[in-house]
Image (cartoon, rainbow, N blue to C red):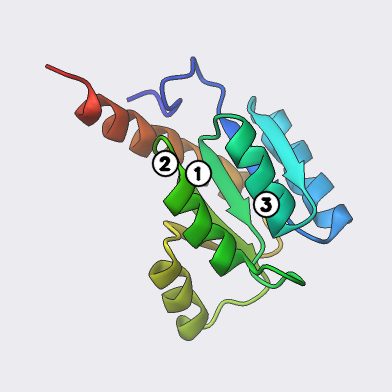
């Protein structure tokens, strides 16, 4: 596996965070890693973006006003027309927080601050995971 999710190395990465500075920082890391960041400042806006285009990975803040990251994850899983790899990026890292993320459909739980090294590993795993899932859906 190449870790590219079948997109020639370039993943479409939706970043949803109500903190503009955090969203911009994560978007820049995504860009530096060779992927395309799509930024939303709210859960509702993130879902609008996801409905309008194909996304491979969703990096969601958990604590946001209005619709929190858990609800965004659940709705993404309901509306997706294809596989999507969902990861939480949050300041909360207790066992209970991580379990809530798993229950909501997150595959990964990243505690802020998110470093390039951590994000690189997550996006590599996401690409590998998406490649396997999409290959399993292909007629053989």
Instruction: Pick whichever, 22 or 76, lies toward us.
Output: 76
Q: Position of residue 15 (x, y in %)?
A: 68, 47
Could you tell which of marks 3 and 2 lies nearer the N-terminus? 3
* Residue occupying image coordinates x 51% and y 20%: 9
Circle nearer the viewer, 3 or 2: 2
**In front: label 1 or label 2:** 2
Q: Residue at x 55, y 28 (%)?
A: 11
Residue at horizontal 51 percent and vertical 51 percent from the top: 76
Label 1 sits on residue: 121
CB atoms of marks 1 and 2 within 8 Å: yes
Verify CB contact (< 8 Å) between mark 3 and mark 2.
no
Task: Check the image and name the residue furthest to the right.
Answer: 21
Quadrant location, the N terminus? top left
**Residue at the spot 57% in from the left edge and 77% down from the top edge:** 93
Q: Position of residue 126 (x, y in %)?
A: 44, 40
Q: Which residue is mark 3?
A: 115
x and y percentages locating residue 59 in the rendered image: 61, 51
Say which residue label 2 marks.
125
How many other residues sit within 10 Å of disc 3, few (<14), some (14-19) or many (≥20)? few
Q: Is residue 88 left or right of residue 78?
A: right
């Amino acid at each position: 596996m190449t870790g590219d999710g079948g997109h020639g190395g370039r993943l479409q990465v939706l970043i949803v965070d109500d903190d503009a500075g955090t969203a911009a920082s994560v978007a820049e890391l995504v860009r530096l890693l060779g992927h395309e960041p799509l930024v939303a400042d709210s859960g509702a806006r993130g879902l609008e973006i996801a409905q309008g285009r194909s996304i491979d990975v969703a990096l969601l803040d958990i604590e946001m006003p209005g619709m929190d990251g858990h609800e965004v994850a659940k709705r993404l899983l309901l509306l997706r027309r294809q596989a999507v790899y969902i990861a939480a990026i949050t300041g909360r890292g207790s066992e209970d927080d991580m379990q809530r993320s798993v229950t909501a459909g997150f595959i990964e739980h990243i505690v802020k601050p998110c470093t390039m090294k951590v994000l690189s590993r997550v996006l590599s795993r996401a690409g590998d995971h998406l490649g396997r899932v999409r290959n399993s859906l292909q007629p053989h």
